[in-house]
Amino acid sequence: MLNTVKRGFTCGAGLAVAALAAGFIAAAPAQAGLTLDKIKERGVIKVGVGSQAGFFAPDANGRWQGFFVDFGRALAITVFNDPDKVEFTNSSPQQRLPALQAGQFDILLSAVTQTITRAFKLNFHFGPVVFYDGQGILVKKSLGVNKASELDGATIGVQSGTTGEQNIADFFKKTGKTYKSVVIEDTATFTQALTSGRVDALTQDGTDLGLRRAALPNPDEYVLLPERLSKEPLAPAVLGGDDRWLEIVNWTVYATIQAEEFGITSQNVDTFLTSEDPAIKRFLGVDPSLGQAIGLDPKFAYNIIKKVGNYGEIFERNLGKSTKIGFDRGLNNLWTKGGLIYSPPFR
Ligand SMILES: N[C@@H](CCC(=O)N[C@@H](CS)C(=O)NCC(=O)O)C(=O)O
C-alpha cells in the first residue's frame, strides 16, 4: 500500500489526470512570436528553476548560479546581449509545470525530463537535452543494501510532481518486491526525510541525489546505489505554440555545444575571429549573412561564448572535476568523445 503523505500534481499518467482535474490542459497555447515580444517589452526573461547547488542556487550575494542557470544567461544574451536580463524563480517540481502553463514563466530550466505525456497532454515543447540523467536511489549505508534489487519492504521518499513517482512504481512491479512510498513536495523536507530516518531511501534523478549527498555534513553515511532506473533526458521546456521562441532556445543551447566542438572557449574566442574557416566565420558572425538570414544578432553565438562559455565550460564550472561535485561528463560528453551532446549545423 502506498502511504501518501502529500500527493499533488504528479507526472506521467498521474500528471495527466491531475492536470485534467485542475483544468491545466485547457491552457491556451502561446501564440507565434508573442513570447519574444512579451519578453522584450518586459525587459527580462522569466525562468523557472529548482533549488540544488550545482544546477541552480543563489550564491552568497543572491546571484543565481549553476548549470541550468547558465543556459538562462545564454538565452538572455541571445535576446538582449545581456546575461543579467533574466529573472530566476524557484518553483517546486509540483508547482512549476502548471506555472509554465499559466504563463508565469517563459521557460523552465529546472531539470525537467522530456516525456511524451508532457508533450501531448501538457503541450510542453522541449529544447535540446542539456543533461542526460537517470533515476537513482540514495540509501542510508546502515541499511546494508548495495543494489536496488535488494530493497524489499523499504520506505522510499519520492518528490511529488516528478517522473520518479511513476518510475519507482514500475521498478517494484518488475522486481516483484514491495515498498512504501512517502510523497514529499518541498525539496528541503525531502532530504530531511532521509537524514531524520523517516524514510530508508530517496529516489530522484541520480544527479539530484548525488548533489544532495554531497551537500550533507556526513555524505559517507549514504550510498547512491549503482542502478539507474530510467532515462531522464533533462531539457528546457516552453509552452507549445510559439515556434520562434522554441527555435531561439534551441539555437542558444546549440551555440554552446557547437563552440565546444569547434574548440572555441570564452578564453580563446577572440583568436578565432581571424579564422579563414567559413563555418567558423558564419558561427561567430564575422560573416554576418547567417544572423541576418535568421533575424538574430549575427554575433549572438560569439556573445554567448565570450560571456558564458561553451557547453564544456558550463559543465566543468558547475559540476565538473574542479568542483566539489566532481561529475564525469559521461553521456554528457560531445558525440565526438563518446557522449550524446550534438549540435545540428550552423548554416
Ligand atoms: N527530472 C524529473 C525531476 C525533476 C526535479 O525534481 N529536479 C530536481 C533537481 S535535479 C529539483 O528541481 N529539485 C529542486 C526543488 O525541488 O525545488 C522530472 O522532470 O520530473
Image (cartoon, grey):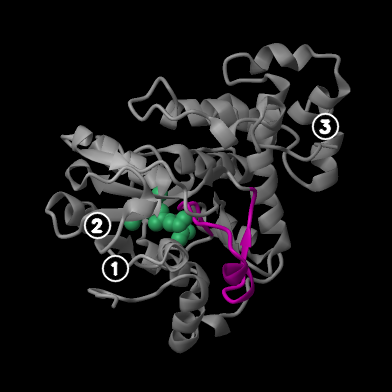
- Residue 343 visible in the picture: yes
Up/down of 162 relative to 122, above or below: above
**In the image, is the residue at mark 2 within 8 Å of ligand 1 by its beta carbon?**
yes
Residue under pointer 2: 190
Indicate the quadrant of ligand 1 in the picture.
Answer: bottom left
Residue 223 against residue 101 in the figure, above or below: above
- What span is in magenta? 107-128
Q: Is residue 95 left or right of residue 296?
A: left
Q: Residue tagged by mark 1?
A: 181
Compared to residue 327, the image places residue 154 above or below, namely below
Cα–Cα gap, marks 1 and 3: 56 Å
- Identify the image quadrant of the C terminus: top right
Q: Is residue 112 left or right of residue 184?
A: right
Q: Tell me the SS state at disc 2.
A: helix
Could you tell me residue 111's position as x and y percent?
Answer: 47, 51
Q: Give neighbour class at mark 1: few <14, some 14-19, many 20+ (Cα, 10 Å).
A: many
Choose the circle earlier in sequence order: 2 or 1: 1
